[in-house]
Amino acid sequence: MDSKNLTLFNRIKDSDIYFSFIKSPTAIVSTVTLIIIFFCSFFVELVTPYNPFDPSSLSLMDAFTPPSWTEDGLAKFILGTDGQGRDMLATILYGSRISLIVGFSAVIFALVLGVSLGLTAGYFGGKYEMVVMRLTDVQLTVPSILMALLVDGIARGIISRELHDEMAIYVLIFAIGISEWPQFARVSRAATLVEKNKDYVSASTIIGVSNLIIMFKHILPNILRPVLVIGTIGLALAIIAEATLSFLGVGVPPTTPSLGTLIRLGNDFLFSGEWWITFFPAIFLVILAFSINLLGDWMRDTLNPKLN
Amino acid sequence: MKPKNLLRTLLAFLFVFASTQAFAKTIKWSMQGDSLTLDPHAQNEGPTTQVSRQIYEALVTRGLDMSIGPQLATKWKAVDPNTWYFFLREDVKFSNGQKMTSEDVVFSILRAKQPTSDFKEYISTVSGVKAIDDYTVQIKTSKPNPILLNQLSNIFIMSKQWSNENFAVVPQNWDAGQETFSATNAMGTGPFKITLREPNTKTVFKKNNKWWGNVEHNITEIQLLPIKNAATRVAALLSGEIDLVTDAPVQDLARITASAGHKVESTPQMRTIFLGMDQAADKLRSGNTGDNPFKKKEVRQALYQAIDIEAIKKKVMRGLSEPAGIITFPGVTGYTKALDKRLPYDVDAAKKLLADAGYPNGFDVELRCPNDRYVNDEAICTAVVGMLGKIGVNVNLFAQTKSKHFKELKDDQGDFYMLGWGVPTLDSHYVFHYLYETDASWNKVNFSDADVDAAIRVMEGEVDLDKRNAAIAKAWKIVRDNIAYLPLHHQVISWASKTNVNVPIRPNNEPLFRFSSVN
């Protein structure tokens, strides 16, 4: 076992990707930042003693405490508290977890949908390809935020109010996912068209391997590189889309706030000098999206120079 | 065209432009919500009346000092305790030029008594209205009514002919979501008329040149532009896009005062904010216990004592509220300081009460709140959710826009809800008649007490003020001891405007643009 692990480690260490990674300070910084954010968000219970979702643990008298380094700040609330007396740091981390869950799920949904449609379209061609590609064209003419608003609106119409709060997060994932799939479909179709004519595909066809196995076992691994690049950048877009929708008030309910909801709630206090309520979630969102984008850029440069 | 002529033409245009700019005085007015309907009898709600008040008038009205004075009637007399005569002004015209006569007054009062009217409680004692001649109206009451004038000051007079022509003979059935011509159009005798109505977006009032009154204002146009988001509303005010905000957010008053071109005025408002708990339902719609905990007075008291009203005052209202013990305020007949005292805030006592009532682990309930009606309404509710959580009552907050909130309350969908109550008549009877009387239209907690009902009858028919006051005091004591509602606080309102805009602030939050000016 040990030797096998060692070889895997050595393989990674000898690879081009690793070499490119340690030569790129932006990639290292953004990866470290993301690891910290992911850890703090998903293990937030270990990081902070506060649970902002438990209303009975809050005290209204703590509300509007400024950050700890300012004059009226308290050491127990590092980034201050919001209008309900919730610790800002804990609230941001819990909010970031929801944002990340929505972002990841939406991208995975878009990726699965987009790649399956793009791959099959590129492989089979013909009328099917035409229909799928025209569908992506149509979809791309509708701004993704409008698409997401539309989906959310329809969902509100058909789902009862009691159910909607519980369903909100799934609706959001679907809404963002459905507005991002055409990117994946286009890229995977283009890559499939290239791979389709290569000898290994012809060889598989000749020896009678079924279409399904050719597509998903042989072609798919070869087109994954560009798809992963798009997926990384798509993650940043999905997180921002989630924040936008929540800021507009159609995202997750305020009882389980995401970053966008927090920015919206804090917006009411911008003029009154309680800047930290909206500033910290906003700056957190910027750092998160920026790090993902930087990592995505590095991946694009390394994995797929052609995509430039 | 020769260059010289062109120059002249341009100069002429410039002159016309400059002069209209100088004479056009526009006030852009904003608040968080809009009037619900222009039909003056369909909804008895603050902002709705605030809009109607600029276009419609009543027989008598309250002036800037809140005292009752003549409006469409110049004088009145009661020939016996049940018969009143009102003598109308003879020079009143509606904004379409048609003369107002006693026929219109009779029509409007009868219209406000229709089942779909939300003002029928105001004039429930009026048993007959008759036109004696063109400018004399006789009103008969079923019993002596000491507050008839107060009540009539809220019954707006419409044109009979206009209503007939536009299928508006009965008030819009707002509760059923009916759409009528009168809900989006208005034609009154007031100092302004509506020229554009886009609900929740923009309402334009123009000066009514046919108005009978002495023009004391210099306004040619008012635009009502509701902006729901508090920060956006303040930003619009500070950037000069809006001239007047009649519900300036408490957290931003310091910022607005600090701005050179703006001013802030505050006054205690004639409005009390409270929570209602349905005491009649067998089972809470949103509960988890299978019964209705609110039926027990101990539970209601536990919720009452679990609310730290001082914390709400300090943190949510920034000091601009007055904790309340009853749903009425100084200035209203029947108010006393002793009644307005709250039960003490005591979490341990609340927990014990809840355990004694059989709910040691609390229960689930949904709290319904408007989010664009009262000062920081949603924030108050959020704070209440946290405070009740501390005694184990798991409250799920449902905040929505006021039109839906009110409609669903009227539809009996609320277990636990927030409401605010003003008293336009400045008499306790109004509160009891709407909120406490058995089956009253806004008695959505379904409170019922024979003694209170009897006291309400006394308030309506007793002209001996000592006896009447005794009845009011007795009724307040009963409802207070029963914790029929959970009072929170009396609102303080703040108006913010540009320094050159003078709109006198009034404790009922109703601007009277006929006394306003723009310099």
Image (tube, rainbow, N blue to C red):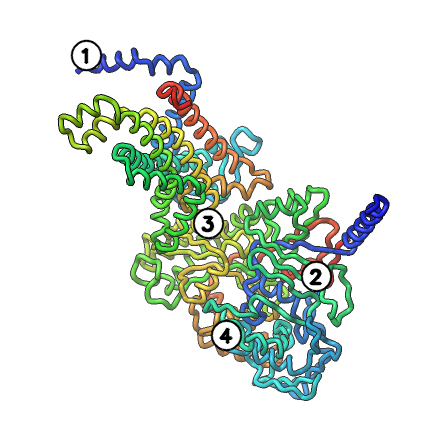
Amino acid on which disc 3 is placed: Thr
Label 4, label 3: how many angstroms apart (C-alpha)?
Answer: 34 Å
Q: Taking the image as drawn, is residue A270 in sight?
A: yes
- Near-viewer residue (B299 or B405): B405
State which quadrant residue B157 falls in: bottom right
Amino acid on which disc 4 is placed: Thr
- Near-viewer residue (B307 or A120): A120
Q: Chain of mark 1?
A: A
State which quadrant residue B70 falls in: bottom right
Instruction: Work out whether B402 lies above or below A260.
Output: below
Q: Earlier in the sequence, mark 4 or mark 3?
A: 4
What mark, if any, has residue A3 been given in the picture?
1
Q: Earlier in the sequence, mark 3 or mark 2?
A: 3
Q: Residue furthest right?
A: B4
Q: Are marks 1 and 3 in contact (CB under 8 Å)?
A: no
Q: Chain of mark 4?
A: B
Residue that mark 4 sits on: B116
